[in-house]
Amino acid sequence: MGSIPVSHPSKPLHHWWIGTAILMIVAGTLAIWLPFAASIAVNILVGWLLLFGGVGHLVFAWYSRGLGSTFLKLAVGILYLVVGFYMLTHPLQALVSLTLALAIYLVFEGILETILAFQLRPLPGSWWFLVDGAITLILGFLIWRTWPWNSEWAIGMLVGISILVSGFTRLMFSLVSR
């Protein structure tokens, strides 16, 4: 793979990177301290996003009636609405599915962070992205191995750990690249 050309950040941008990293560290720490609340919050957020997405799909189906199958477009919109409504009205049951989806997401994020580490290899501190990728991969496999018994706390805990590690990675990268 080719490397991505990256320039060093300017001073104001550098301060934003550090501020964002610190916010990520705080958010990750809160999610670790309150894993059940964080799990429910993630579930509710995803439920609302699906509801909004369902409305968007239905509007698209209505205004694009001549482009392809209207039935399929309506079916996708209704599926979004049903799943979003279910997640909002049955958050504990929805956490089981969401926990498995999170495990899959973390595995793919870990792979992408590892690829990014090799693309940024010429820059000082780029190895932090490799550390982030490895930890994220491990978290993805851990959640998958203990699923579904960990569904009430795993999402909040693992999202918290992932955000904390990503924040720490960005902070270290920002400090090293000064």
Image: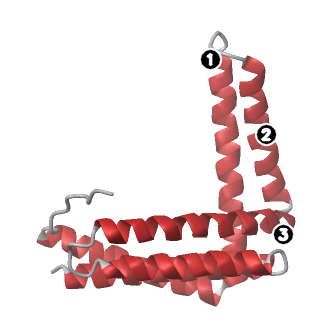
Look at the image and tell me in which quarter the N terminus lies.
bottom left
Residue located beneath label 2 in the image: 79
Q: Secondary structure at mark 1?
A: helix
Residue 22 visible in this rendered orientation of the protein = no
Q: Which residue is mark 3?
A: 92
What residue is drawn where x is 53% and y is 87%? 29
The kind of residue tagged 1 is Tyr
Where does the image place residue 36, in percent across and percent down from the top left? 73, 80
Residue 18 image position (x, y, % from top left): 28, 78
Residue at the outermost top position: 66
- Which class describes the residues within 10 Å of circle 1: few (<14), some (14-19), or many (20+)? few
Front in this rendered view, residue 127 or 49: 127
Categorize mark 3 by other alpha carbons within 10 Å: few (<14), some (14-19), many (20+). some
Q: Is residue 124 left or right of residue 131?
A: left
Q: How far apart are the two marked residues, 2 and 1, measured between alpha carbons?
A: 18 Å
Q: Secondary structure at mark 2?
A: helix
**Badge 2 density bin: few <14, some 14–19, many ≥20, Cα 10 Å:** some
Does dot 3 land on a helix, a strand or a loop? helix
Q: Which mark is residue 166?
A: none
Identify residue for label 1. 63
